[in-house]
Every structure is written in C-alpha cells, then in structure tokens.
Image (spheres, rainbow, N blue to C red):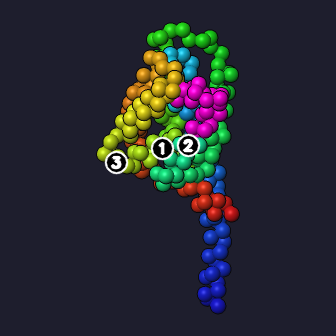
Amino acid sequence: MISKQIQAAKKPRTHDTKREQRRTIFRQWLRIAWGLLVFAFGVHLTIYANIGLAPWDCLGMGVARQTPLNYGLAMTIIAVMVLIVDLLLKERIGYGTIIDALLTGNFVQMFNTLNPLPDNQSLWLGGAAMLIGFVFMALGMYVYMKAGQCCGPRDALLVGLGKRMPNVPIGAVQIGLWSVVLLVGWLLGGPVGIGTLIGTVGAGAVMQIVYHWIRFEPRNVTHKDVVEVTRILR
C-alpha cells in the first residue's frame, strides 16, 4: 500500500517535469528565432556595406557562374553539402539547424527590403557597417547556440572543426575556414572585393573578441538533436 502511494505521488511530478521540459524547448525555439534575427541583421549590414561579398556568398556566386544554377539554388546545394560534412564530422543535427535553414534567409531579405537608407557609396562607411555587422552576427550566433538545439549547417561545421583543434581559438578556426571557402569561390570566378578580404579576417577576429568579452566558448555547449527533442515533445 505504501509503495503504491509513493508511485502515485511520483506520477504528477514526472508529468510536471515533462511539461516543464516542453516549455523549455519552446522557449529555446523562441531564443533561436531571436538569435537568428540578430544574426540576419548583422548579415544585412555586411550587404549594405557594399564593399564586397562575404566568402560564403562569393562561393555561391562562383558556383552559379560555373553551372546552370542561379545564386539561390547554388547556396541551397552548398548548404546541403556542408550538412553532409557536418554528419561526417559527427555533428548533431537539431531543430536549431532546421529553424536556421527556414528563417535566416527570410530575415535577411526582410531587412534588405525594409532598409530605408540609400545604397552606400562610401568605403569608410562601408567598412564601419561591415565591422558592426560582424558584432551582430557573433552575438546572434551566441544567442541561438546557447539554446543547445544544434547550429546551422555552416556554424556546425565551424564548431566541428573547432572541436578537432581544441587549442586553436575559435576565431582563428573561422578565419581558416572562411579563407578556404573564399579561395574556392575565387577559383570558381566569384567576385572578390576589399570587403571580402575584410570579412575573411575580420569576422573571425571580431567573433573572438566578442566571445572573449562575454566569456562564451561554443565548443562547450551541449546540444540536443532532433531525436532527443522529439522524444521529449512526444
């Protein structure tokens, strides 16, 4: 009789725990969306800078020039290929990865459409806008990575490479990754400008400074993949 009473008392607690876990997941999804909004605003600033394409965009344009694909399809295929590399690196794929794929591009397009400012023609203003954009991109990555539901394909690749080079600062890992991406994009005929070079080195350096300042190490975040989160939701 006593054991049955104990088991009956445990059931509501277990149910409450599951319900709280679901609420936490939904809050994390909102956090991911907010982080991607911040990140997308940073990307928008780098586009507004108008001083050169970022490395990944340079790669996408290079692929588009060498194939019948348009830029959007080229970037989609690149994302799928990066995702395959993530799986080979045994990086976990979560709802954060899916939300990233669905929202980031649309958020960037929204900012580009709503931008009330005329096209920038100043090199100095463009450089400043690009550096500020890097700060927003780093902060956005921090916000949605902290949710612990895995990263977007390119960020997962960065983290996966970073885990294999634990003694190398994560900013330096990003500089190396973006340099390789830029080289391939340039070889394929992608446009390169002063902003591209600034982005290749500057984004990783700014990210390292920001993460050092807020004491964040993305390689230490524990993520839940799609299977784990779905099990909790069910």
Q: Residue at x 52, y 52 (%)?
A: 87
Mark 1 vs mark 3: in front: 1
Q: Secondary structure at mark 2?
A: helix
Q: Residues within 10 Å of mark 1 (few under 14, many from 20)?
A: many
Q: Which mark is residue 166?
A: 3
Magenta-drawn segment: 58-79
Q: Are marks 1 and 3 in contact (CB under 8 Å)?
A: no
Of callouts 1 and 3, which one flags the residue occurring earlier in the amino acid sequence? 1
Q: Which mark is residue 64?
A: none
| Figure check: 10 above or below 106 | below
The image quarter in which residue 119 lies: top right
Query: Is residue 33 covered in magenta?
Result: no
| Figure check: 188 above or below 174 | above
Direction top: furthest residue: 121
Using residue 205 as the reference point, say whether residue 70 is left or right of it. Answer: right
| Figure check: 76 above or below 21 | above
Q: Residue 132, image x and y in percent?
A: 48, 24
Of callouts 3 and 2, which one flags the residue occurring earlier in the amino acid sequence? 2
Q: Residues within 10 Å of mark 3 (few under 14, many from 20)?
A: few
User: Does the rendering let one see residue 33?
Assistant: no
- For badge 1, the amino acid type reads Leu
Q: Residue at x 42, y 33 (%)?
A: 180
Q: Residue at x 64, y 84 (%)?
A: 5
Find disc 1 in the rendering and name its residue: 157
Find disc 2 in the rendering and name its residue: 81
User: Does the rendering let one see residue 52?
Assistant: yes
